[in-house]
Amino acid sequence: MQGFIHRKVPMWARRLATMTPSFIVIGLGLDPTRTLVLSQVVLSFALPFAIIPLTIYTSKREIMGVLVNHKITTIVAWLVAAVIVVLNIFLLYQTFFPGS
């Protein structure tokens, strides 16, 4: 991201930002494995918000020019996005209706 925002982020700030959550988890006495799994579940819900716009933008020739996705790449990307959304809905269903 450093090159994208055209700002130099000091190494200590990057390390602090990445290590602080780990220290908080350990300091609170939480199970690190369960916390890691929960963080990945939360990230899985954010994934469609990245994949869907990315697929839309990279499939438009007026935006991407010659670097536009091939048709098959766009189809595969939409299939992957659909699978992720369906799995997230299933996860929510299992969470709110256990044993159904």
Image: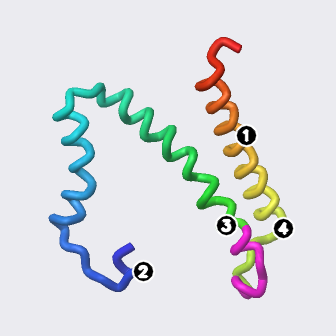
50 vs 18, left or right, is right
Relative placement, left or right, of 8 versus 95 is left
Q: CA distance from mark 1 to mark 3?
A: 17 Å
Q: Secondary structure under badge 3?
A: helix
Whole-angstrom CA distance, mark 1 to mark 2, is 32 Å
Measured Cα–Cα span from mark 3 to mark 4? 16 Å
Q: Nearer the viewer, mark 4 or mark 1?
A: 1
Mark 2, residue position: 4
Q: Is residue 88 above or below residue 80?
A: above
Mark sitting earlier along the chain (2/4): 2
Viewer-nearest of labels 1 and 2?
Answer: 1
Nearer to us: label 3 or label 4: 3
Residue flagged by tag 1: what amino acid is it? Val
Q: Residue furthest front?
A: 96
> Which mark, residue 86?
1
Can you give x and y, in whole percent of width and height, for residue 31 in the image?
29, 25
What amino acid is found at the position of numbered circle 2 in the picture?
Phe
| Residue that mark 3 sits on | 53
In this rendering, position of residue 96 left or right of residue 74: left
The residue pinned by badge 4 equals 71
> Is residue 58 magenta-colored?
yes
Q: Residue at x 63, y 31 (%)?
A: 91
- Mark 4 vs mark 1, CA separation in Å: 23 Å
> Compared to 97, does 64 lie above or below?
below
Residue 37 shown left or right of residue 16 in the figure: right
For image coordinates 76% across by 63% down, the residue present is 73
10 Å crowding of disc 1: few (<14), some (14-19), many (20+): few
Q: Position of residue 88 (x, y in %)?
A: 64, 39
Work out whether mark 4 precedes mark 1 in sequence or the reverse, and give the earlier one: 4
